[in-house]
Amino acid sequence: MNAVRIISLLIDIALVAALFVGVTTYLFFLYESKNAGEFTNLRNKFRDRLPKTILKALGMSIGSQLLVYLAYLLGLFPSFFFLHPKSGKNPPRPDKPAILLIHGLYHNVSAWLLFKWRLRRAGFRNIYAFSYASWNTDFFEIRRELEGFVDAIRQTHQGSKIFIVGHSLGGLLGRSLLATTTGRDAIGGLVTWGAPHRGSKLAAVALGRLGRSLEFQGDLIKTIEAEEKKPESACLSLYSPVDNFVLPTSGLRIRTAGWREVETAAMCHVAMLYHPEPAETTIDFLKNQRADG
């Protein structure tokens, strides 16, 4: 089998996987929306546009999942694309704040390649990405690793705050970090994209104990809520009304005081990484917080 046929086969497998994920998760979405009493709100919001909206979001899901699969290998070389506090290399502007990006479950730093390009176009230079494994670990073990990563960034950018952007589980990790001494001292602002703030019923079919721990209103969510207080830094939660991974939709809503929540245009969970709206809203937030690094 030559290289062209192998590549073609891999693309076919990726397409089938993207179709499967998109269709099954939106079937779950429709079921949970009706089961949780949220379908009436959807129908009132979109009226006769609801079928078209769901189909468009499904198309986004298939396309964005394909992008994830095709770019995934690039994430195995994080130091090639992002700063690392222990690399020994000086950041472009050590006198300016740092931006730290945290990917979601089963993903890697390739999630942020397009957003990094948008950040650089907006003038930001000190861009880090935290990478973690989704297997044979748990939420608080990853948070401890994240604390060490943040402490290392602080050594480079002494006197400057760190601004975090997290997608999905990455957003929940950033939120939980705020409850730690490191988080309170180091974080100047936090933006979450499609974070399962109250968990997701889809966690019941997740692979691995980390994924299953994200159950809707489960023990992990209760622990996070119990240990946190009103954040001292500015916090923004972005969520889509048709998110197909955080189910029901109420799982996206945060119950902690001090947060600002913004509903985006209708898009699937993974498309938040590629759609311009979350990126533009986040960049405006960072500029307003003076994270002009």
Image (cartoon, rainbow, N blue to C red):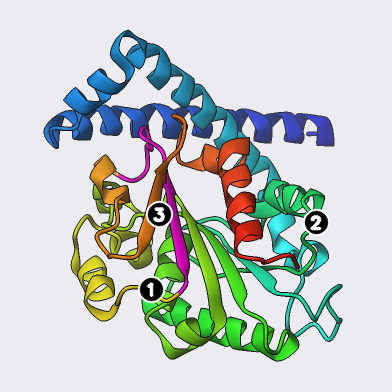
Is 39 on the left or on the right of 9, as rendered?
Answer: left
In the image, which residues are magenta? 233-246
Find residue 136 and report its horizontal and vertical position in percent: 43, 73
Q: Nearer the viewer, mark 3 or mark 1?
A: 1
Q: What residue sits right under mark 1 in the picture?
A: 231
Answer whether labels 3 and 1 touch (C-beta < 8 Å): no
Could you tell which of marks 2 and 3 lies nearer the N-terminus?
A: 2
- Amino acid type at circle 1 is Pro
Position of the N terminus by quadrant = top right
Q: CA distance from mark 2 to mark 1?
A: 27 Å
Q: Tag 2's secondary structure?
A: loop
- The crowd level at tag 2 (other Cα within 10 Å; few <14, some 14-19, many 20+) is few
Find residue 34 and report its horizontal and vertical position in percent: 16, 28
Find residue 78 and report its horizontal and vertical position in percent: 73, 65
- Amino acid type at circle 3 is Ala
Q: What residue sits right under mark 3 in the picture?
A: 195
Q: Is residue 188 above or below residue 262?
A: below
Could you tell which of marks 3 and 1 lies nearer the N-terminus?
A: 3
Q: Tag 1's secondary structure?
A: loop
In magenta segment, residue 124:
no
